Image (tube, rainbow, N blue to C red):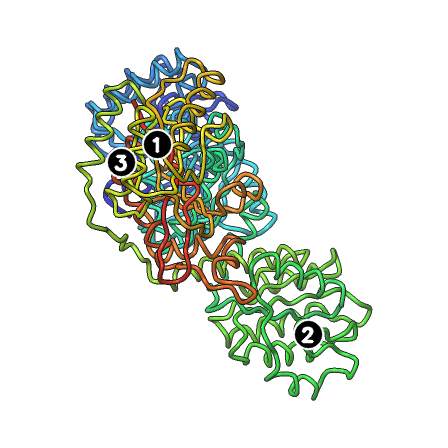
Amino acid sequence: MEAEFQPLFEPNGIAVIGASRTPGKVGHEVLKNLIDSGYNGYLCPVNPKAEDVLGLKAISSIKESNDNIDLMVVCIPAKFVPTVMEEAGEAGVRCAIIISAGFKEIGPEGAKAEKLLLETAKKADIRIVGPNCLGVISTGPISFNASFAESMPKPGNIAFISQSGALLTGIIDWSYQEDTGFSKIISVGNMADLEVTDFIEALRHDENTDVILVYMENVRDGEKFLNIARKACSEKPILIVKSGKSSEGAKAASSHTGALAGSDRAYDLAFQKVGAIRASSMEELFDLAKSFSMQSPPEGENTVIITNAGGPGILATDAVASNGLKLASLSESTQELRKFLPPAAGFHNPVDMLGTATSKEYSQTLEVCLRNESVHAALIILTPQAMTDTPKIAEKIAEIKKNYLKKPVIAAFIGGEKVEEGVEILQKAGIPCFPFPERGVKALAGLTKYAEFKHVSPEEDYPRFAVDKKAVKNLFSQVKEEDRVNLLVSEGIYALSAYGIEAPPTSLASDPEEAVDLSAAMGYPVVLKVASPEVLHKTDIGGVEIGLKNAEEVKKAFKRIIYKTRKRMPNARLYGCVIQKLVPTGREVIIGATKDPTFGPMIMFGAGGIFTEVMKDVSFRLAPISRNEANKMIFETKYYSILRGVRGEEPSDIPALIDTILKVSQLITDFKDEILEFDCNPAFVYPKGKGCQALDVKITIRK
């Protein structure tokens, strides 16, 4: 354990502020829990009205304590907590678990009290867990229950961090039924000081913790989470259930990217970037926890299903496909299986041994399948028939598994009393057993996803291109001086060009005559677009005219565009029209970005033009991104099949597209504090070797 967290998890002495003689009061239950949990350090009740509490000599103030107190648990009304914090600082206390409520969770007055509390704690050099939390429990190396939870969990290798204290009490009770143990249980409360990310860092260095579980409602510092969680995930799995999946945050977005982002997507991307596994429910979280605490991640995605019933085997097969796994090929093993299974058995994957399957057939089948090099993991299904010896089958499975430590084996024993003994045998042998195959497959999928993260060498090398950052900075300053937040198309194209992104020749004309001169200079045909910071969707008001072939057409188009804009949007500021050289049509894509308030810039790729909103065929990542991530973004879309060439069509210039996405990633990262929304739509992707160009771009910056 790191020195910073030793006062919390390995305290020499603990004081309970507000220790009470009255059963049922928080101060009484916390002190009783500390005694009952076997804490063998110095334990000191603090109560000015009692000489002793629960047989321990009490002191009237923390100032009277000796130098052995590292940690105090505070169970007094909120208004007295800052004073106690000052006294604790003088007494040398280094950490405080503040169970007391009445802080920011009650509103503005409580928020002021919490701010004062934090300021006082910082002056006293005391780190805070809470306030408004359940407490902290550790089962080793020093065992203590500094909480008001009713029970002490069994020791284990799983740590649980939760933003809900009430949830923890239920989980502890559940863990006895499931025979699940914990190394640490941490209720973070309001996170005035120490937050979820801090505890991930602490548990990363905890020798008693192999798996980190998190119930999360929010992350306070996105950049800090990304940095710390990625390091932690490279050493041990982090499994997260995140509440609050509302998309309300997208409603105010003005760009395609912002509208498609959704408020919860950034968390998905953050977990993906750091390698954390996101569970969709508490049940799935603990299914994953059980599996990760018992099994090693597989070396591939190929799974074999072994069953004594056809229906559950089919359900498992469907689950394998929907969870991103693959059925292993058993062509090498089929002949061996035919030697001992009945002729009517299913010898391919899934292997259906029929309802008559014996413990010997389970054992032989599992041995043959795990011996096959193309098999990376196994799901074993059992339904209790009249002839099924469930305990014996479980023993044989456990026996075979010992020889294949790198290949996870998960079981699904369907039933109740008839399979109970077999389930117990498997779980004692370190083989997770679930009541239904779908849950087993999801657990295998989580193990496989983590294995992929571990096996792929992290490509933290984000490409950097030679760019003119100063030019973009000056441009943004000029836009702000004009009291604008939306760049004109010509300005947006200028910014892209400064970052090496190809675009057609583009200029701004303030009147029809200038439009003619600029058009002649760049060569016909040309495109005219209204130039106004208030007009974000130009085609909607007739603000775009394409394929203008001569000076007369340009003059008339300029006047029509200005007339239509003034009629539809009389208050819009008009800078004239943007003139752009008409270029050959390519495959239309969108490259966008929006700023998430927690994790910063998110970059998007997808089908462009009119298809963006209709198809919503897009992929997101948190910026900056690597070349590998850019490639995956393209591959994840359905539009990839068009880009790679179908029915004899030429493949698109995907390497040039990847470079363009990476350059946009660099731009939005370099200006992450200024660019709020970015839409390059459409960009044309040309056939292989011919590059791609940005035709239109909307950039919104912070004032």
Q: Write the residue at 33% across / 29% down.
A: 488
Against 144, residue 421 (above or below) is: below
Q: Write the residue at 33% across / 18% down.
A: 81
Q: Amino acid at mark 2?
A: Val
Q: CA distance from mark 1 to mark 3?
A: 25 Å
Q: Are marks 2 and 1 in contact (CB under 8 Å)?
A: no
List the single residue furthest toward the top: 109
Residue tagged by mark 3?
Answer: 671
Picture coordinates of residue 443 (x, y %)?
56, 56
Picture coordinates of residue 664 (x, y %)?
32, 44
Q: Quadrant of the C terminus?
A: top left
Q: CA distance from mark 3 to mark 2?
A: 56 Å
The local secondary structure at tag 2 comes to strand
Mark 2 or 1, nearer chain start: 2
Q: Write the residue at 64% across / 78% down.
A: 365
Picture coordinates of residue 660 (x, y %)?
34, 50
Q: Tell me if residue 485 can be seen.
A: no
Picture coordinates of residue 93 (x, y %)?
24, 29
